[in-house]
Amino acid sequence: MERSIAPFDDRSITFLHLNAAAVAPGGLSDWLARQLRLAISAGRLPVGARLPATRVLAGELRVSRGVVTEAYRRLTEDGHVAGRGRRGTIVVAAPVVARPPVPASPPSPAVFAAEPGADVFDAVRAVPARIDLSPGLPDLAAFPRTAWLRAERRVVADLAPADFGYGDPRGAPRLRLAVAHWLARTRGISVDPGEVIIVAGVAQALGLFAQVLRRNGISKIAVEDPGSLGARQHLRYWQLDTPPIAVDGHLLADLRASGAAAVMLTPAHQFPTGLVLDGERRRELLRWAAAGGLIIEDDYDAEHRYDRPPVPALWSMLPERVCYAGSVSKLLAPALRVGWVLAPARYRDDLVDAKRFADLGNAALPQLVLAELMDSGDLERHLRFLRPRHRRRRDAMIQAIATHLPGAVVHGAAAGLHLMVTFDPGFADTDLAAAALARGVKVQPLSWHRQRPGPPGLVLGYAARTPTDIADGIAILGSVPRSGLPG
Amino acid sequence: MERSIAPFDDRSITFLHLNAAAVAPGGLSDWLARQLRLAISAGRLPVGARLPATRVLAGELRVSRGVVTEAYRRLTEDGHVAGRGRRGTIVVAAPVVARPPVPASPPSPAVFAAEPGADVFDAVRAVPARIDLSPGLPDLAAFPRTAWLRAERRVVADLAPADFGYGDPRGAPRLRLAVAHWLARTRGISVDPGEVIIVAGVAQALGLFAQVLRRNGISKIAVEDPGSLGARQHLRYWQLDTPPIAVDGHLLADLRASGAAAVMLTPAHQFPTGLVLDGERRRELLRWAAAGGLIIEDDYDAEHRYDRPPVPALWSMLPERVCYAGSVSKLLAPALRVGWVLAPARYRDDLVDAKRFADLGNAALPQLVLAELMDSGDLERHLRFLRPRHRRRRDAMIQAIATHLPGAVVHGAAAGLHLMVTFDPGFADTDLAAAALARGVKVQPLSWHRQRPGPPGLVLGYAARTPTDIADGIAILGSVPRSGLPG
């Protein structure tokens, strides 16, 4: 590395034109180390150059000698300069700088043109739109920032050092207890906290279930049709077949015909139709499960309901035949990536293994903050705050649809964060979604969530938007001439 | 659900002996709803019971009628009571309570008796010990709590609502940029931030690499012997063979003989031996990779070094043949579950898919807090604070070994958070670890990390313990009569 030694040019007024006058006294070493690194990486101090003696540079910059010694020490530790005894301190390697980001290609509004691929939701998210009526989000502007920070302060103050280490892959005991209480309160589920496993949201839950079922010889999981495209993509990624079954009276007949040993359902609020699994089908389904079938219960937004009492979770009826998944994504924020699963005893060890080898368990701090929010009542207060807000937004959307989308039929508006509209056949809903996006309004075509043909429709999220945005967005949707779209 | 209606017993002085006098005015509805839920779930208000009229109960409790109305509203929303017109408000369903946790079986100190299973690290963690000298942890007591909370406050204040939604599965752009700068500064890696993928620690990184390599036809990854048991378990979980290769001069010969198309290495600081991959083997290895081999570079603790300059990452020599993984586990805390990977362009899309279908991407808040700590210089300051602290602890351990473990050979103490000692053959190191644990000292037997036979030894973490604990722990280790252990 070492080359011939270029002496420091003493004719310059100050070394590298450095001027320490404007630097806060406490940050002088930081500043000097940074300036020297910049000079080395820019080639102004090439490999082989000698730095001034600490005494000389300190005098020149009018700083204490300790400031210079400390800056040189850091560069030495980083391997950029090295002491060479009487020959002084020499530059031996240039710091590397991060490359500037290559500009990403601009997001394409043609996302609705092709069959949706694995990255379709990322692609849609990347397209800018003035009004985003995508489903799946609660009112994110209402995220309880103050309560979150207050809880985090308490948690960080109370934490033992060992809590910052590796933890139980099943989750922090305190959160598992808080979730057991939460599920009892909000979902009528009576569960031992030791059976709760904390995961990174329902998406991870589906992946873990899929891995465990595959390892137990199940290769096919029937899914609702229409049913969540995202959930189906997750199961398929884990190499499970996903035969479609109806969400109406034909559910059980379709399920039996599919030959699948397992079925994934959204019983409390079917996605995207908003149907509630009624008593008759519920009983049939439980009989099917009791006879050897397995149910995956995706309880994604069960806390949100407006005009009806809660629907009990299937898990509480037949815990040994139901894998249950829920999360805070629709309650607080998807960005938290915290959820929970309950599973039949015979799958639990495999599930813990799957979670361990996925990521060794969720991060500790957000788990404990969430437990604090659950225990303190803050989360329940937040839900109570959200409900009337969401209800007003839903009402605004229904009103706007009645005004601007005559002929559209509204489905499933009694609960949740979205509703579904269907139209008379005669056009492709992907074309309607594309035309809306071209006008600045983002919506999801119903056909994305279908495996078998059906009337065109849209899935519209209302919870995350203001009534004004909702009214404007639906008016723009209404302005798209559907008769002009290809059939 | 509805049964005969039991009228409220008007003879009791106050309904359910409720007394609102000690309740803060703002919390009256919370309190009343909770009391009523408790009474219903305990059977004191059975299904079918009628609640007092709101006016009556308000008068009795001396609270405003709105307090009672609000409490009844919440119970109605939860589905526990229902309005029945002129018949009043009736209990229709009892709230469910969480089951008490089943006491876990006490952790067994026999963890060293059997072959280590998938849950061995969890099992060891669960055994209490007075002095824990397990490797793999930085000084967790030094976690920068104040800086973390300060950064989190700034992040939460600045966040747009959309940042609480679903994010880019590759990670938050701000953290990817900060990591690119961090890798340039500390690891001599020059990378476009667009190529950085944020993951949940090196454990998840290995799982994602394993999945992607399997999907690309690689079924065997050679691993160092001795080498990390944990890392090997992760690869095996994902159904990869892990043939062992030497960590000395035979590395390349073993690698070629293994027939593996990929190898996992810890070049900057071999785990557990602490060796640095020397120039000669480094050149041989890069030639092997350039001819079609693939290297997985586990850069798990490269920031920690005491008596030597940094070793450049292999990734920077041959980025198209190296999958690189690093994390903040050894820098800040494993409990944060944040790491990063760099990968050859041809694997990058598969890797993003694997991360998306693992968990849709890391949680947003901790990513942004970490970016803030990196950008503000707080993380670098923390590292500078840790270095002399860790060095003192290492020195304390070396000194204690010289005093209490005569005959033990110390390896790899110039860097990292642990060191390795080996002994003359003649006993099983798992027996030594078991005897130490029985005396309250937790250590890892070297044989756990071996696939082929070799001299007994221990892997000893020093960074997370005080010099006093280290000296005491090593003295206790020295008190175990090794000659009495079975050979």
Image (tube, coloured by chain):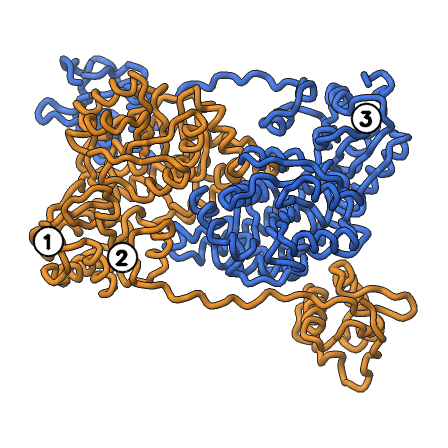
Chain colours: A orange, B blue
Q: Position of residue B225 (x, y in %)?
A: 72, 37
**Of the numbered discs in the image, which one, if any, rests on residue A248?**
none
**Amino acid at dot 2:** Phe
Residue density around tag 2, few if under 14, some if 14–19, many if 20 or more, within 10 Å = many
Q: Which quadrant holds residue B409?
A: top right
For the residue pair A258 and B228, the one nearer the viewer reads as A258
Q: Earlier in the sequence, mark 1 or mark 2?
A: 2
Q: Which quadrant holds residue A438?
A: bottom left
Residue density around tag 3, few if under 14, some if 14–19, many if 20 or more, within 10 Å = many
Residue under label 2, please give it: A112
**Amino acid at dot 1:** Gly
Give the CA separation, mark 3 to mark 2: 66 Å
Discs 1 and 2 carry the same chain letter: yes
- Frontmost of labels 3 and 2 is 2
For the residue pair B122 and B254, the one nearer the viewer reads as B254
Residue density around tag 1, few if under 14, some if 14–19, many if 20 or more, within 10 Å = some
Q: Which quadrant holds residue B260?
A: top right
Q: Are marks 3 and 2 in contact (CB under 8 Å)?
A: no
For the residue pair A385 and B371, the one nearer the viewer reads as B371
Say what secondary structure mark 2 lies in: helix
Give the CA separation, mark 1 to mark 2: 18 Å
Discs 1 and 3 carry the same chain letter: no
Residue under label 1, please give it: A426
